[in-house]
Structure formats: C-alpha cells, structure tokens
Image: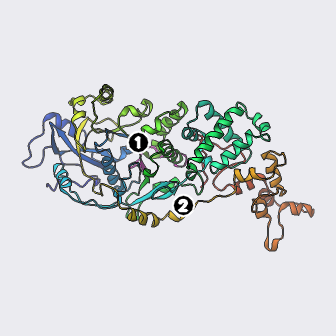
Amino acid sequence: MSDRETTPGTGAAPPAPGSRTGAPALPQEALEIAAGYAFPGPALDLGALLWDGTSLPDARIRVPLSMLNRHGLVAGATGTGKTKTLQLIAEQLSAQGVPVFLADVKGDLSGIAAPGQPNDRVRSRAAEVHQPWTGTGFPAEFLALGGIGHGVPVRATITSFGPVLLSKVLQLNQTQEQSLGLIFHYADTKGLELVDLKDLRAVVAFLTSDEGKAELKNIGGLSTATAGVILRSLTAFEAEGMGDFFGEPEFDTAELLRTAPDGRGLVSVLELSAVQDRPRLFSTFLMWLLADLFHDLPEVGDVDRPKLVFFFDEAHLLFDGASKAFLDAITRTVRLIRSKGVGVFFVTQTPKDVPAEVLGQLGNRVQHALRAFTPDDQKALRATVRTFPDSPYDLEELLTVLGTGEAVVTVLSEKGAPTPVAATRLRAPESLMGPIGAEALDRAVEGSAVHERYAQAVDRESAYERLQEPRGGKGPDEITGERRRGTGEGRPGKGPDEITGAGKGGRGTSSRGRAEEGEEPSVVEQVVSSGMFKSLARSVGTQIGREITRSLFGTARRRR
C-alpha cells in the first residue's frame, strides 16, 4: 500500500488520481469525477470510485466535514447495506470529535462500541479500496425510550412534548389537534403542570365533567364531543403501556453533545428494537429530540465541523399520516437547525418516502441499490434517478445492479456545490458489524455517567394531584388561589408557600405572617410570596402559570 495514502479523517488531501507509481491512468470521465472529491480540508472517506464494475482505489470518494450539517439522505432497498453505511459515517465522525446520534431500530448498532472482527470479507473489502483497516471500538452511550430495553431511560414531559407531536402519536385529525392545543393553553393558564399522561388525562376529564363544563365554554372552539374523543384516545394510549415514555426526570438533549475524555465524539445509540411495534411513537419521539435541540442550541452559522450529526432511521414512519402542520414544522426545523451546527440524515428505502419540501433541504446523498420487480418499483426507480444531477452513468440500470456495500454518492463540496455523481464501493466499518452481547450492553448502561441521573422515574405533584383535591365546586384557578394563600386542603406534602414560610423550629416566616403582626413585608418576601415564584418553585424546569412560549412543534422550552 502506498505510503501516500492517508488515514480517514486526518484532513490531508488524498493522492492525485492515477499518480501512484505503476498504476494505470484513470479514464478521463473517472478522473473528472475523482477531481470533484479531492477536498483539501478535513473529510470523511466513504470509499473508492467504481467504474465499469471495477474499484479504483486511487479515486477516493469523500465528504467534507464542514458540510455534514447540510443534512443528507441514506436510501436503498432492504439488505443493501444502509445500516453499515451509518456505522461507517458515525465512526469517522466520532474519530473527528463530532458527537453522533443513531436510532437503532433493528438492534444491531450496539457493536459500534466494540472492535470489529477481521474476516475474509472485511480483508477483501479493505484491499479493494486500499483501506488500512484496524478493529476499533468507539465511545458509546446506550439509551432506551422510557427505559424499555437496554439503555438509560429517555423520557419527556407532556408539556415539553407539546400538542402537535402528541397529536401525531395519538393519530388525531387536524380539528382534534387544534383542540388539543387549546387544552394545553388552558392547562398553562391555570397552572396545571402536565408532566405525564395521567396529568393530561385528568385535565381533559375535568373539562368534560359537570364541574368543568363551564371552564370548557371559556375555551373558544373546543366542543365537549372533541374533548371526549381526545380523552378516549389518551385513555387507550395509556392502556397500551405508553405511560412509561412520559414523565420525569426528563432527558436533557445536551447529553447528546458530549465528547469522550480522549476527544472522540460520543455515539449515542437509542435502542428501538424493544418498541418496534410502536413505530409512530418512536419516530415522533425522535422528532422531539431534534426539536428540543433546536430550542436550546445557539446560532453558529457555518462551522468547521458539526456539533452533532443526527441519523433518523426508518424516516418514512415519521411522515406517514402526518398533518400539514406537522410536515411544515419538520421542514422548518430541518431548514433552520443547520445554522445551529446540527446535521440530520434521513434513512429510508426510497427518496419518495421523504416529502419534497424536506428532500430539497438534503445536500448529501448515499443511494444504495433499488429493486425494480413491480411496476410501482420501476416508477419509484425512475423518480429516484430524476433527483440526481446529470452524470455519465446510466443510473436507472446502475441502481438495480449495485452490490451490498456499494452506493451512488453525491455530496456538497466545501464551496457548497454538488459533487459529480459517483458510484462507490464503500469502506468496511472498523467496529463490530453486529450487536454486542446483552451482558456487555447492561454493563455499559450501568457504567454510564448519566445512568444514575435518569434511571429512577419521579412522580411529583402536578395536574393530576391538583385536580384530585377536594374542589367543592371550585375551578382550578380558585384552588390555585387557595393554595397560594395556604388554605388548600387534602393536598399531599407541603407546597412551595409552606416550604418558603417554614423556619427552624416550625416558626412561620412568611410575608403573610408578618402582615398579621402589622409588619411591612420586605421586597424579597413579596417576591417569594408571589404566585409566579411559587408556580416556578413547583415547576423546576417548566414555565407555567403563564402561556408557555411554544416552538414550531408546540413544545415548551425548558429552563436548564
């Protein structure tokens, strides 16, 4: 192997095509394609150019590191190597110090944490593309939705999830989605904090009860019948065991941005194999993770390397049956999150699985083989070919004969222009191409630096508990007022007013107590005794008691 070849990710320019001593000159068309990938800056090495079925290892197909936040698509039929492509890209990003998020739908990406095992196929592929292959494990964090499966539990509060994403999970229509938004608005204004499903169910049940019907009339456009439909949907959803996904402690998506002590980017692997039968839920949860990152990250514009690259596997599940509002929100999020340093790759079978508005935002493409066995397959193939720039390849034929681990690639150059279309024989991943054992996975989870923070679910006082209190015909706002005056009955534990008013030895030091003694409360005491302060004290991490400023998805911005 020539000593002029470089290790992927070092940033050194590849050798000039056809420059190796004794190597035959490349065809002119192949030279032109290879020249389009000879970037001077840091880049990921995808593999070697394929021309007339032959691998040309001197013609490296690469993607600039600085363009990985311009989003991308990895597509191809089942069994063509999409998962290994994710693994290959994730490894090189991690080696460059870029954190990665992987949605592991099939349960076989955990191997990224362990060194790969050499075998004849790996050695053959490495030789074909002149890859200096070495088995290497990468720093990984394993996550699991609601703790179902092997991983640190990932939960979200109902408030942060918001009405638009929740409507997608509950399969509500547009009218019901808008009505759910009004219910969230009502809970916000009444200080009824929505932490888990039973909180939202309690609010809807109250609004449809004899006591709450008067409150319902004050919410414009929300009918009793629609509220009843939403309540039944929530009840059925919770009965299916979905309650574990919502609650506290809520997962802080800043955990996804960490690096390992050795400077490599952390690969966060969200295990979804245990919830494969709930595709609408996990695809929407992935969108929540992305929306939450969008909330919190500052604008950075163009960067030398992404802050995070997010791989959205089985992307078609996200778009199936989505409302127009939901699709509009996805499109805006994908378009705007680039300037926050986050790259998003959608992984699916054909480009037509992704709406045109979203597909137009994706600058990097890795297209594996497609099948054309049926008229529908042939139609999808022709539609895919039309999405590529002009090229010397007969793409309609090429895309049906690519082998496993081969793909058609076009990316954005460092100047932001599309590179020539390149048939590529991809490199072999250096980590384990398969899952690690269950025992090793459990050890990795228990040894995680964040396991203790999220392992144990917390069920604190929120809307459900508030609405279980004796009301005596009073609405939530009147109960809130009584609680703030310290006159509420039947509530479990102490409220923030009692906590701030209790001193050593049980002596009351609240401003109300001072007022009874004829003393003027201090400014600090006035603030502490205010309704807003108590509301915030009840809700660490969530702003309630006022209309919450909601994002594109209606999710609430957290305080951290």
Q: In this view, does 62 lie to the left or right of 104?
A: left
Looking at the rendering, in which quadrant would you find the N terminus? bottom left
Between discs 1 and 2, the one toward the N terminus:
1
Is 241 located above or below residue 380 in the figure? below
What's the residue at 26%, 35% (across, down)?
421
Which residue lies under the disc numbered 1? 314
The answer to whether residue 411 shows anywhere in this view is: no
**Residue placed most toward the observer, 217 or 66:** 217
Looking at the rendering, in which quadrant would you find the C terminus? bottom right
Q: Which amino acid does label 2 sit on?
A: Tyr
Query: Whole-Å distance between the Cαs marked 1 and 2?
Result: 26 Å
Q: Is residue 276 magenta?
A: no
What's the residue at 58%, 50% (across, down)?
243
List the single residue furthest toward the left: 22
Q: What stretch is highlighted in magenta?
A: 294-312
Q: Is residue 300 magenta?
A: yes
What x and y, as percent, mark residue 406? 24, 42
